[in-house]
Amino acid sequence: MHELTFFRTWLPVIYLYGVGGIIFFSGMVVIFKAKTIKRERQRHQRWIKILYFGFFYYLLLHVFLTYAALNF
Amino acid sequence: MEQVIHTSPMFWIIIVGYFALILGFGSYFARYNKDTNDFFFSGRRFSWWLITMSIVATGVGSHSFLKYSAKAFEHGFSSTMTYMNDWFFVPFFLFGWLPIVYYTRIRSIPDYFERRFNRNVRILATIAILGYMIGYIAIGFLTMGKTLQPLLGWDLWTIIWVVAIIAGIYITFGGQTAVIFTDLAQGFVLIFAGILIFMLGINYLGGFDIFWNALPPDFKLPLAHFNKPANFNFVGIFWQDGVAGSVGFLFMNQGLIMRFMATKSVNEGRKAAAFNILLLLPISTVVTSNAGWIGKAISIVTPEAWDATVKLDHVFTQVAALVTTSEVVFAFIIAAVAAALMSTVDTLINAVAAVVINDIYRPIIKDRDEKHYLKAAMFISAGATLLGVITTSFFDNFPTLYEAHGFFHSTMTPPLVIAIFLGIFWKRYTTLAAVATFIVGAYLMWLGNAYPAFLIGPFDHGIQMNPEHPYSYIRALYNTLVCLTSGVLFSFIFTRKVEVRIEIYTAKVVANARAYFNKHDANATSTRDIYYVVWGGFCKIVNSFVKNAASDEKLDGITVWTLDKARELFKGSMPNDEPGLEPIVRWKIEESDESFMRFAQNQMEEMAANVGDLVYVSDKRKWLGGLKSAHSVYAEPHHEDGVVYLTPDLVDAGQFVQGRLLRAEKEM
C-alpha cells in the first residue's frame, strides 16, 4: 500500500483531465472547424451539449470518488 | 498448489444448457443472413439500444471479469480506470470517424486506406489489422482457459482447444446478426450476473459498511498511484489504455465498427456509442471489478475463508465460488462469463473473416456469387480460430492477463491508430507519410523494444523499468510519438506536389529500364544492367506507392473536412435535411424489377420528403429494434392515404409480416 501523497491522490486526476482535456477540446475545435457538427441544426445542438456534459460528468465523478475515498 | 473447485454434474448441466440456449438464440437470427453484407454488417438496420446492449457483451468480454478482478484484488478501485477514460476521443469518433465509415460504406478498415491512399497502403494496413485482431482473439482464448482451469483442473491448452472448437463452429454458421443477438442477450445477463456477485458478496461480508470500512483509503481511490508500481500505475495506463486503447477500440476495432455499421443511421450509431460510454461503461466497470474488491474485503474480514495461494487471474472464480451459496447460481455466473468471452472472440473472428474476404479474397477471386463468398467466409472464420489458438502461447508468458493485454495494446495499436487518425483529420497527410508511419514507425518501435532504457526511458514519467517486461504500459507513449513524428515529418518532406514529381520520375526510370532490357543482349552484363536492376526495381516499388496518390478528388468524403461530400455521395444527390414526421402506414406489394417505396402524397409532405430521397421503414413494434426493416428511395407518390407500396425485393429483405403496420422515416 502507498502513502496518501499528492502523487497518489490528486495528481492522477489533474493529469487525466489536463492531458485528456487537451485531447477532448482539440476534438471539439476540429469538428467545429470542419463543420461536421453544425450549430444551426437542432439535433446537433443537442449533441454539443451531450459532448460537454460527458466530459464534466466524468471529471466530477472522479473528483467525487477521490474525495469519498479520502474522507469517508 | 491451488486447489480445483469441486463441482457436481448439475453444475455442468447448467453450463452446457446455458451455452445451448444462447447459441440457439443467436442461430435463430442467423436466418436473416442473405449475403455477405448481412453476414458481416447485418444490413444496416438496427436501433441504437439493440446495438449498445450488444456492445456491452463485446466490451465486457474483451476486457474480462478475470483481468479486472485480478487487478481490483491487487490495487483496489483503480481497476476502474480503463473503463472511465474513453470520453476524450468521443468528439473525434462521433463526428469524424463514425460518419466517414457509415457514409462511405467502407467494408473494412484497410478499405479506408485504399480509398484514402492506394492499394499498397491497404496491404500494409491489412497486415497490421489482422495482427491486431488475431492477438485479441488469442487473449480471449487465454482468458477463457484461465476462467475454466480452476473448475476443470485440466491442462490450459486442452481447455483452449475445446473452447476454440465451440467458438469456431458457432461463428462459422452464425454471422454478424447471430453475434449481435447473442450479445444482446448476454449484455443483460452479464450486467445482472456482475451485480448479483456484488450483492451476494456484500451479503457474505455482512453489509456494505463492513465492506467499505474493511478497505483502506488507498484501496478505494479511483485512480492508481501516478507512477508506481511498474506493473500498475496511472500514467502508464493512461497512455496505454486511455489513449492507444481507447483510440484502438473506437477507431480500429473492426468488430466494433461492424456493429456501428449495423445501425439504421449515423445518428443511431452516435446514440449507441454515447449511451454505452456514459452509462454502461461505469456500470460495466463495477460489474467486472467487484469480485476483486469483495475478495480483498473477505481476505481482511474473514482470512480463514480465503485461499491465500489463489493465482491473481483466478480471483474471480474463487470469489464466485465463495459468495454463491447455491451451485445453480455459481454455475449461472460462470456460464454467463464464459459465454461473454465467447461473444468477444466470435465478434473478432467474424471481423477477421470480413477483412480477409473483402481485402484479400474478393480482389483475387472476382465475380463469384454471394454463396461462394459466404462459404469462403466460413472457412476463413475456422482458420482465424486456429491461428488465434496458436498465438495464445505468446501471451501466456506474462504474469497476468492485464499485463499481456497492456503490452499488446501498447505495441500493436500505435501505427494503425496514427495512420487512421492523421488520415481522417489531416488533409496534408500523404501516401508516403502513411507508409512511413507503418514502416519507419514500426522500426523505431522495434528500436525502443531493443533499447528501452535509452529510448523509452526519457518518457517514463518516473516509472521504474522492470527488466523482464520493460515499460509494458508507458511504451505506448513512446510508440505513439514515434509513429506520429514519422507521419508528420514525412508529410512535410513528401508533400503531394513532391509525390507527383516522384511519380513522374519513377515512372520514367521504370519505362527506361524496360526499354533498355527489351533491346539488351541477355548474355552480356554491364554496370548499366546493375543500375537498371537496382535503381529501376527500387523506383518500381516507390512508384507503386505514389501512383494515383495525389489528387484532391480522392479526399472527397474520406476526411473530416469533406464529410458533406460523403453524405452527398452516399445519397447520390444533395441530402434533404428538412425535419419531418414518422408516419405509421400499411404496406402492399407493387410488382417491379426495380427497388423503391411509393408513399401517398400526404405522407410525403408529413415526412418533408422528395422523390429520390432515402427512406427507412421498419415494423411498428419498436422492441424488434429494426430486425424487420428495409432501406430504399422514395418513388413518385400516389393518393391512397396511409399506404406504402413496396417492391418484392424490399418485402423479402425486410421480412415484413402481412398485416403488420410499418413506421416510415426519411433518412436524408
Image: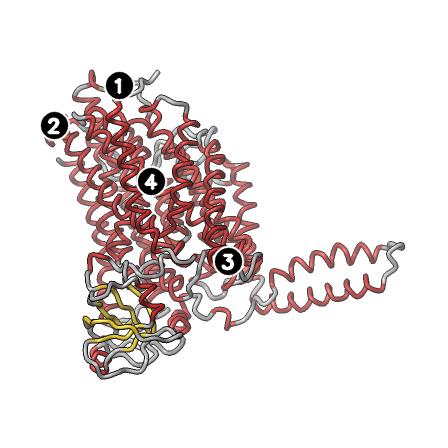
Q: Amino acid at mark 4?
A: His
Q: Is residue B28 above or below residue B102?
A: above
Give the distance between the C-alpha atoms of the residues marked 3 and 2, in whole angstroms.
55 Å
- Closer to the chain start, of discs 3 and 4, is 4
The disc placed on residue B210 is 2
- Inspect the image, locate mark 1, and give the three-letter code of the amino acid beneath it: Asp
Q: Are marks 1 and 4 in contact (CB under 8 Å)?
A: no
Q: Chain under label 1?
A: B
Q: Nearer the viewer, residue B334 or B143?
A: B334
> Mark 4 or 2 closer to N-term?
4
Q: Is residue B630 left or right of residue B359?
A: left
User: Residue flagged by tag 3: what amino acid is it?
Assistant: Val
> How far apart, in angstroms, are the residues tagged by discs 1 and 4?
25 Å
Q: Mark 3 falls within which chain? A: B
Query: Mark 3: which secondary structure?
Result: helix
Q: Nearer the viewer, residue B624 or B363?
A: B624
Residue B486 in picture, x, y percent from top left: 53, 53
- Whole-angstrom CA distance, mark 3 to mark 4, is 32 Å
* Image location (x, y in percent) of residue B494: 58, 62
Q: Earlier in the sequence, mark 3 or mark 2?
A: 2
Residue B551 to residue B227: above or below: below
Q: Can residue B3 be seen?
A: yes
Q: Which residue is mark 3?
A: B488
Q: Quadrant of the C terminus of chain B?
A: bottom left
Residue identifier under label 4? B63
The mark found on residue A49 in the picture is: none
The circle on residue B307 is: 1
Q: CA distance from mark 4 to mark 2?
A: 29 Å
Which color mode does the image show?
secondary structure
Q: Residues within 10 Å of mark 2 (few under 14, many from 20)?
A: few
